[in-house]
Image (cartoon, rainbow, N blue to C red):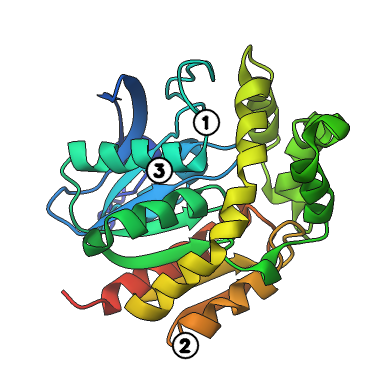
Amino acid sequence: MNIKTSMPAAAPLQSITATTTYHRVQVNGVEIFYREAGSKDAPTIVLLHGFPSSSRGFDSLIPLLATHYHLIAPDFPGFGQSDAPSPSSYTYTFDHLAETIGNFLKQLEITNYTIFLHDYGAPVGFRIILAQPERVRALIVQNGNAYDAGLGVKWAKIAEYWADPKAHPEVVDAFLSFEATKQRHIAGTLHPERYNPDTWTDEYAHLSRSGQREIQTELLYDYRTNVASYSKWQAWLREHKPPALVVWGANDPSFIAAGAQAFRQDLPDAEIHLLDAGHFAMDEQTDEIARLILNFMAKLPA
């Protein structure tokens, strides 16, 4: 005898392939690759990646947010699938990256958005914010530093390199090494099993491409301008007081937890969460970060 039972219909599942599309656009002669997801009628979140990652680093987060929001995640020039012109034809400074990505947003007519800043995404994003403050609805910061207090001990050695680059080639060697690429993900984490090793092997393969050492060396040297700009960014935060969510991997040895707490100095109403995670907190606290973002975004004024 066949017994038929009535089963409730399964809820639709969100996945990367169901929600994300992939695009390329020319911006001032440079092809910029970007991921897009969600309804274009929904509020937009612009996701800015870190080093040595790309918009691929948001693959797990995007489908969790695309149910309610429009997501745009570009690759910076020299990163991911975007063009990587030689330093002789493209000046690799954070000013120039911000100019290019700012023009990318203008070209896509993204005129009102919340901006997500991770690692290198912070200096790129803060420059965009200062250039186009009227377009920014709110900030989400994930281990994107803007305070001296957030600099871990490794930055003392990098500062020696900034002072005399020719005397410290070993700093660049270490910065671009396979071990450093791996440790950016798993250093400080209590859950290394949550990290896909393909992530750092793919990133290191990208860093090993012809021309990448020159590109990344120029950006590492220019990073000194970000530290010099902290006071300018802080002044903007104090003046404009945007709604802000700070979600921070508390075990990050590069940008330490004090960098998260420091936002309170200039944004007393900021929502700050220290997570049991490392620098790439999205890789091990994906669901929690998505939950915090969805709750934060839901509270923003229309």
- Identify the residue under disc 2: 268
Q: Residues within 10 Å of mark 2 (few under 14, many from 20)?
A: few
Q: Is residue 2 left or right of residue 227?
A: left
Q: Secondary structure at mark 2?
A: loop
Task: Compare residues 243 and 131 and report the one nearer the observer.
Answer: 131
Q: Earlier in the sequence, mark 1 or mark 2?
A: 1
Residue 265 sits above or below residue 121 on the image: below
Q: Residue at x 60, y 67 (%)?
A: 248
Camera sees residue 6: no
Camera sees residue 50: yes
Q: Earlier in the sequence, mark 2 or mark 3?
A: 3
Which residue in the rendered view is the most extreme toward the top? 210
* Amino acid tagged 1: Tyr
Task: Compare residues 29 and 63 and report the one nearer the observer.
Answer: 29
Q: Residues within 10 Å of mark 3 (few under 14, many from 20)?
A: many
Residue 292 sits above or below residue 188 on the image: below
Q: Residue at x 65, y 22 (%)?
A: 214
- Identify the residue under disc 3: 98
* Amino acid tagged 2: Pro
Q: Is residue 17 left or right of residue 50?
A: left
Residue 103 sits above or below residue 5 on the image: above
- The circle on residue 92 is 1
Q: CA distance from mark 1 to mark 2?
A: 35 Å
Q: Secondary structure at mark 3?
A: helix
Residue 90 position within the rendered picture, expressed as x and y whole percent measured from the top left? 46, 22
State which quadrant residue 188 falls in.
bottom right
Residue 191 position within the rendered picture, expressed as x and y whole percent measured from the top left? 75, 56
* Amino acid tagged 3: Ala
Q: CA distance from mark 2 to mark 3?
A: 27 Å
Total numbered circles: 3
Could you tell me which quadrant the C terminus lies in? Answer: bottom left
Q: Nearer the viewer, mark 2 or mark 3?
A: 3
